[in-house]
Amino acid sequence: MDYVLGLGDDALVAAQRLAQWCARAPELEEDVALANIALDQLGAARLLLTYAGELEGAGRDEDALAYLRGDREYRNCLLVELPEPDFAVTMAKLLFLSAYQKLRYEWLAAAGDERLSAVADKARKESAYHLDHASLWTVRLGDGTPESHRRMQDAVDRLWPYTHELFEGDHAALRPQWLSLVTAVLDEATLTRPADGGWAPGGGRQGLHTEHLSYLLAELQVLHRAHPGARW
Amino acid sequence: MDYVLGLGDDALVAAQRLAQWCARAPELEEDVALANIALDQLGAARLLLTYAGELEGAGRDEDALAYLRGDREYRNCLLVELPEPDFAVTMAKLLFLSAYQKLRYEWLAAAGDERLSAVADKARKESAYHLDHASLWTVRLGDGTPESHRRMQDAVDRLWPYTHELFEGDHAALRPQWLSLVTAVLDEATLTRPADGGWAPGGGRQGLHTEHLSYLLAELQVLHRAHPGARW
Amino acid sequence: MPDPYRLGLIRQIAQHAHSEIIGMQPEGNWISRAPSLKRKAILLAKVQDEAGHGLYLYAAAETLGVSRSDLVDQLLTGRQKYSSIFNYPTLTWADVGTIGWLVDGAAIVNQVPLCRCSYGPYARAMIRICKEESFHQRQGFEILHTLAHGTPAQRAMAQDAVNRWWYPSLAMFGPPDTASTHSEQSMTWKIKRFSNDELRQRFVDMCVQQATVLGLSLPDPDLRWNAERDHYDFTQPDFHELMRVISGDGPCNRQRLEHRRRAHEEGAWVREAAAAYAAKRAAREPAGV
Amino acid sequence: MPDPYRLGLIRQIAQHAHSEIIGMQPEGNWISRAPSLKRKAILLAKVQDEAGHGLYLYAAAETLGVSRSDLVDQLLTGRQKYSSIFNYPTLTWADVGTIGWLVDGAAIVNQVPLCRCSYGPYARAMIRICKEESFHQRQGFEILHTLAHGTPAQRAMAQDAVNRWWYPSLAMFGPPDTASTHSEQSMTWKIKRFSNDELRQRFVDMCVQQATVLGLSLPDPDLRWNAERDHYDFTQPDFHELMRVISGDGPCNRQRLEHRRRAHEEGAWVREAAAAYAAKRAAREPAGV
């Protein structure tokens, strides 16, 4: 169950962060595109949380899992919960996340669990689109103006340490493929790929998050929790 | 009761905003000073909310009133709930608020309600100190650098419309005194006092707030509400 | 096309486009806090639709020879208006439902006639928009219906929101016919087909019946059926308030425009980067390929 | 005063001052969310005390011929360190109580001997600071006691926080005596009076008894009384982790320094204004008045 929950929480937290761009994106087309990606993430989160609840067998549905767990019970990776102070950080996060999700979903689509593979089959196509979108912007910003190059490189450098957590344990084998997806984009964007081997924060999959997540959840859950047991 | 609640909510919301400067003030001495002012506001809020709860007679204590009302039930003026994007806005808010609180508390200290007058007698001395502190900074920033002058004038202009609400109804008589307190500071600070007669937003005393307050309360209340009935 | 007709059309389409863009804010305010994941998805999709409507409408205006960046500039500098309804705050979740029910409802009553207006590109945009808006209106109605049939706190939240939005929604039809400046000319040009008061009456008649289904009351003690007129009698909104809000002094005018300006400014470096990249690409590629 | 002694003192006092300043962040993280108004006031006052401690300590360091702005600069550029304990996140309200109990407890054990250290201004600052810290430690203990005797969720929150903070607190006494680089010299100079391991043992002995009163367990299966040594045996913290955190790779090192840098940068215009105003005032007033 933790495995499915991790995927679902990644998607839910990513959706929440992406939706914050709604009505404040750099251009109107981007409002539409980011809302679209947020909707895809939210859709995947709903399917995955529902399934996680069924696996648990304690009667928790998607809303019980989304709204009534604290940050110590969330299983998302740290990358998705980090704040997004500018559009470059958002795009770097999306680049790293969508490349990872694409590989994870492709793998799951082909794996044994029928239920998961149905979700993954849909989600991998969406991830491929998210990756395209993030790649496009990474290249535009990396190879745009000196300012955009500086911001994009800074975002990549800042977030890189958090990408190690994605390939903890079983998933280590996916990192080489991920590196080749991401490196191709960074190269085209005239950006420098950070060196590996440094700081590698983790803990999200065990519920040990950054101080940012509890704020995000406070906002996400405030209304639902204020009316215990209500239907919406 | 609404009268006491209004004063108490002003102080509580002001304390919450001021405390946000903790560990991010422009200098260490100012971390100490702003925490001090926040503590004074919080102290006054606790006494006033406790008293409001007694007046209501429904068994609500300071925490029930602070943590279990939504923004539609809060009675603070809009001024205190506005976001503080920079230090100039914080100081302009504090200037306007503390001059108002000083006059209100002085008036209450001399008025009939014994319980209120005891609270007000302590609080008016604190307000006088807050006013001194805000005045000092208003003058420093107004008469400092061109940038600080611009920011301080901008803050004063932005917040001025919200000062009308402070003198709604019964309190209209206090505005001339308030104007003379505030004008003296603005003059010394080489700042222009905005013209009266324009936009005068209100509604806070009736529970009609800006969209900002519910976010502030979500954060203030999140932990308390997550553990119904718990003692702390 | 006569210039006054063209300028009138541009004014009307631009104002409509701006309204969609500014209208994203009050509802967007609740996306992060939507009380269930399903509602979050529906609301996010709705706000996304508004951005989409803005895009079609700017495109329709561009067929009349103005550029989108000029129109955006006119919005940001306050020279062109947007619907005043978006200058009210969304204080609770029930406001999201009420905006869907009343505000989108009023917009549809206003806009359906425009689907047959005399300028093709505008009429076509309106057909698509009206279809989506009636979908949004149903969703808003459904939110309110759930609240009105939920816990006492939810029910109170729903009634409170309806109380606050009713008169501002009536004001969406504009000043009374006796005082409307543009209407007569617009009707002659067939970019408007019914008078403000006709549309307002149609809206009131519709809402009274829907409010009964919701089990919520409308905050007008004088609302009653008039068999002689075959319409409901009702209290007019406060048109002085409407004028104040239009002239810039509503509760959120400054906030909405400032939000939009800030988004525009904070996005400038991104748009510049995209332009610089496109220019480099163009320069790298051999001409004509 | 011999230079190495002076520099050693400056290093130690500055590191202590920096720790107070950075230490404001993890606890400050809960001020806005404190679960009762009384706890909010106590926590705010505590974080304010830390700023005050920072001020005394910078002042004590200045008596040794360095300027505060130089020291701040050394902090912001990472050339001087602060206590590594503040590079762990505060994940729940119980962390606030646990920091009070364990972290302030460890600080006191470390600092009480310094009240009798050889340099007067530092010793005097430490006397005042230790008094306030033992007050903070009692408050932390009280928070944890309330949680440990509260609802099951509160109790679990308390135990979880103690589990996370125990070993990092033990690590606050520094590397084992066999590996400490500065200790021996500092003890000769009497700016340090007991060894790391002596102080760590004193802390463990103290905590075991207090944990019993709290009704919480310490996350060390090998913790037991050793009658022979007249001390508790315990598992040493992971000193490799400590070294990693000291060298910059703890969970929050980047966040803490970045927060401080941002506050410093965002405050620059305010400090410049204050300086400009002071200069104008000085120029306006006749000399000597």
Image (cartoon, coloured by chain):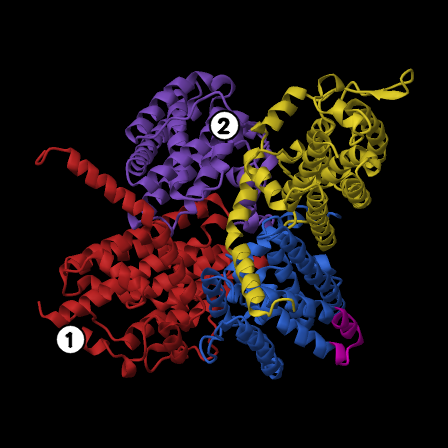
Chain colours: A blue, B purple, C yellow, D red
Indicate the secondary structure of the residue bearing disc 1: helix
Query: In the rendering, at what x and y percent does residue A97 appear?
Result: 60, 69
> Label 2: how many residues lie within 10 Å, few (<14), some (14-19) or many (20+)?
many
Query: In the rendering, at what x and y percent does residue C14 appear?
Result: 67, 38
Which amino acid is tagged 2? Val
Residue at horizontal 43%, vertical 66%? Answer: D252
Name the foreground residue: C274 vs C40: C274
Quadrant housing residue C70:
top right
Q: Examine the rendered structure and indicate whether residue D227 appears above or below residue C272.
A: below
Residue holding disc 1: D188
User: Is residue A120 part of the magenta span, yes or no?
Assistant: yes
Cα distance between the residues tagged 2 and 1: 62 Å
> Label 1: how many residues lie within 10 Å, few (<14), some (14-19) or many (20+)?
few
Picture quarter with the N terminus of chain A = bottom right
Same chain assignment for discs 2 and 1: no
Residue holding disc 2: B4
Name the foreground residue: B227 vs D150: B227
Question: Main structural element of the magenta stretch: helix, strand or loop?
Answer: helix
Residue at horizontal 28%, vertical 39%? Answer: B144
Lateral position of residue B185 relative to residue C242, left or right: left
Give the residues drawn in magenta, as a range: A109-122
Indicate the secondary structure of the residue bearing disc 2: helix
The answer for which chain carries disc 1 is: D
User: Is residue B152 part of the magenta span, yes or no?
Assistant: no
Query: In the rendering, at what x and y percent does residue A66 appear?
Result: 67, 59
The answer for which chain carries disc 2 is: B
